[in-house]
Structure formats: structure tokens, C-alpha cells
Image (cartoon, rainbow, N blue to C red):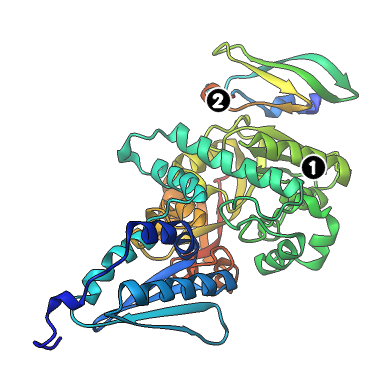
Amino acid sequence: MRESLNDILCCPVCKGDLELEITEQEGDDVLEGTLHCGECDETYEITDGIPDLLPPEMQD
Amino acid sequence: MSERHPKPEVRCTVTEEEEGRRRREELPTLKRSYAGHDEVRDGYTLKFLDTEETLASLLTFVSRERSCCSFARYSISSSPPYDEVRLWIEGPEGTKEHFQELIEELETDDGPEAVSNERLGAAGSDDDGVSSIERRRAVREQYADVAESSASEDSDGNGGCCTDGVSSEQVEELSRMMGYSEGDLEAVEADANLGLGCGNPTALADLEEGEVVLDLGSGGGFDCFLAAEEVGPDGQVIGVDMTPEMVERARENRRENGFSNVEFRLGEIENLPVADESVDTAISNCVVNLSDDKSRVYEEVYRVLSPGGRLAISDVVVTTELPDELKDGGSSVASCIAGGFSIDEVRSTLEETGFEDVEVEPKEDSDELIREWDGERDLSDYLVSAYIRGRKPES
């Protein structure tokens, strides 16, 4: 996912803003990292450039 | 039935061993290709999908029946355009009752495909205790199979909602029926197009350069890439899909197609991971019908649209109540759309959500496409593909 597009994302559960933490990056493209919701304290993984923003009960 | 030949005539002399053989050998094929029956005066006409395999099984079936149930007359007929083969069974009074069991057997779907269909279908109803999460998981599993089978070019994969596994030639043919132009098909690498849609939402969205577009249920990414061409480098397209295998494929397709203004996220359309008022146009192709909470999907779309933002989707809607046999098992397609909205329900839901300028326009000639979805039944009797539009008020 592109770092510059983080603004358009939100927590699927409470719609709170997400804080991006980058582990691996290629230019503007975030390959690995996490998105953390400050409001409901849920954390979403970014794996291979894809943020997993499924609600927690739907995550594998 | 004449009085000189009382009831004993109608009886079956089949042995357990013969019955077992029939269950193993011809019944599975006949069940797969069974397409319904008509009652005749003292019997039935059973209809099957006309394939060589069906014909062979029918022949074996009749040759066995005429020895164990010699009271009845059998006739197999197949006539142009050979899409259906009929088995006519008639006999003395009581014949109908005797073959009732066979019909029940044919109507019970218990193959391996049916297990997943059953799960999908059952999960759709609210009163059987199956949660909506389980239903979503089931839909996701089915689409994961499509993503993977298409990736390996295996055309025998399980079907998604709108088509069974198909070859790339079939995808192109289906895509033309959906309303994609030759230019659209050439603009994007073929792998992104899985032939799972029911229309061409980018064609009805009137996208403008620089817009932010959200695709609900983006699948292989085909519509996202077409939208990306329209919104240009200053625009942005975001595809949301709940199937990891689909999102991975879409991302690979993005690499191959070289679109830098397209992004994919794993997410649910009922719980969009998209910020309020951040999207200019929401598109979707034959996905909302799969949701068991369509009102919520439209509420979510309304939330993420900017004031003045537009909804422009293609989806199947139900034109008449589905018969129970379709709701309860039949094909994967039927299981998916068993809970579909009617045109009026779509319209009223959108208006209640707050959308203006709501239009639900049945797509001309969509029956041609919909007939392709199920080899056994003509679903165009119950479904139509529609273009659905709406606008969020400016203020």
C-alpha cells in the first residue's frame, strides 16, 4: 500500500484513524508493517503490500 | 388401470445389490444433470441437461428399470438444439407414486459441490442459527477457489456467484455480454478479468480525471484497472475484497498492468476500512447481492462518499420469488442470490439510506448472460442484471 494513501483508510470496526508503522518499504510502497487504531486498540497487519483490514473475527 | 390387472403390477423387483450399483453408477450423473420434471397423466417426464454422459447413464438406467420395474414404459428423447434430454416414464395407475421416490432422490443434492452450496445456501437464512460470519467465510472460500483455479488456468474450479469456472475464451465472450468493449478487454491484461461480473460499472460511472474511485469486491482487479485509465495519474482507485487470494491476484495483476494509481485492501464491504467522505465514486460488479446485509453495504458506501459522490454499480436483482428448489440447494449461483433484493427493494433501501437520483435500470439482454450461469436452469426467469445509480446529496 502507498504510504500517502493512509489518510483514506480507517478502522473497519470503529472507523477511527489508523497509525501506520512501517517495517519494510519500497519507495512510497509499504510492504510490511502494521496499522494501529488508537480508538479501539485493534492492530491490522500489512503483509506483502496488502493491508488486512478485515474485522478481527474475519481474520484468519 | 384395468380391474383385471390390480395393483401388484406396479412393483419393483430390484435387489439390494442392483440398487447399490445404480446409486454408485448412473444416479450421480443423473442427479448432476437433473433439470426438473413435468407430471404426465400416469407418470413423469424427467428433464436432464443433454450431455453424452447423461445419455449413457439414462440408457443404463432404462435398461435396468425395464427389468426391475417392467410395469412401466420408458422413452428417452433428445431433439435439437440438444440442450435437454427427456426421460418419459408412464405406466398403470400407481406409477407416479412409485417413481416419486426417484424424483425425491434426484432432487436431493449431495455431491461434493453441493456440500459447499448447501453451506452457502443454509448460511444465508437467519433462522437456522448459522451466523453471518460463517456465511461470509463460506462466500470467501468459494471465491478463493475461483482465484486459485483461475490462477492455475484450471477451468474446472468451483463457480463464483456469477459463473462457474470458465476458460479465458469464455471469459471474453461473457465480458462482451456484460457490456465491456473490445477496447476495455484489450486495455487490461486478461488475468485480471475473471468473468465474474454482470455488467460494466465503469461504463456507467462517468468517471472524471482525478477522482477517487472505490470498487466493492474488486476480485481480480479488472474494473479497477479500467477505472484507473479513466481517472488518470492524478486519480486513485481502491479495490476492497474480503478474499485474500483475490487481493493477492489483483496485486500481481497490478504489477503486470503497471498501474500505480490502483491499490487493493483486504476488507469487507459491510465494514469498509475507508475514511468518511473520501471517495468520489463507488463502483461494484455483481457483489452486493452476495452480502447478507445489503442495507449495511449501502450505508457504508454512503458514509465513505464525499458530498455529491456517486454510486454506480452493476448487480443482479430478483424479478420474482425464487422457487424453493432453487433456494434450497440447486446451484452455487442460486445459493448466492437466494437472498437477493428486488428492484423495488434496492430503490427503497437506497432512498432510505439518503441517496438521491436513484435509478435501478434492468440491463437489456442480460438474460443472455444470466443463462450462462447455470447449466441446468434458466435463471433469467428469476433474475436480471441491473445498473444501480445514486448520488449523495451535496450537503
Residue A13: tell me if it is visible.
yes
Q: Quadrant of residue B315 in the image? A: bottom right
Mark 2: secondary structure:
loop
Residue under numbered circle 2: A55
Point 84% across, 17% down: residue: A24
Chain letter behind tag 1 = B
User: Can you give x and y, in whole percent of width and height, for residue A36 in the image?
Assistant: 65, 14
User: Can you give x and y, in whole percent of width and height, for residue B351 in the image?
Assistant: 44, 50
- Label placed on residue B235: 1
- Label placed on residue B375: none
Chain letter behind tag 2 = A
User: Can you give x and y, in whole percent of width and height, for residue B340 in the image?
Assistant: 44, 54
- What is the C-alpha distance between the residues marked 1 and 2? 27 Å
Q: Residues within 10 Å of mark 2 (few under 14, many from 20)?
A: many
Q: Residue furthest left?
A: B3
Mark 1: secondary structure:
loop
The N terminus of chain A appears in which quarter of the rendering?
A: top right
Q: Is residue B42 above or below residue B166?
A: below
Point 60% across, 41% down: residue: B307
Q: Toward the viewer: B119 or B362? A: B119
Q: Is residue B223 above or below residue A53?
A: below
Q: Toward the viewer: B293 or B12? A: B12
Residue B342: tell me if it is visible.
no
Q: Residues within 10 Å of mark 1 (few under 14, many from 20)?
A: some
Q: Quadrant of residue B210 in the image? A: top right
The C terminus of chain A appears in which quarter of the rendering?
A: top right
Q: In the rendered structure, which amino acid carries the disc numbered 2? A: Pro
Pointer 1 with pointer 2, Cβ within 8 A: no
Q: Toward the viewer: B68 or A48? A: B68
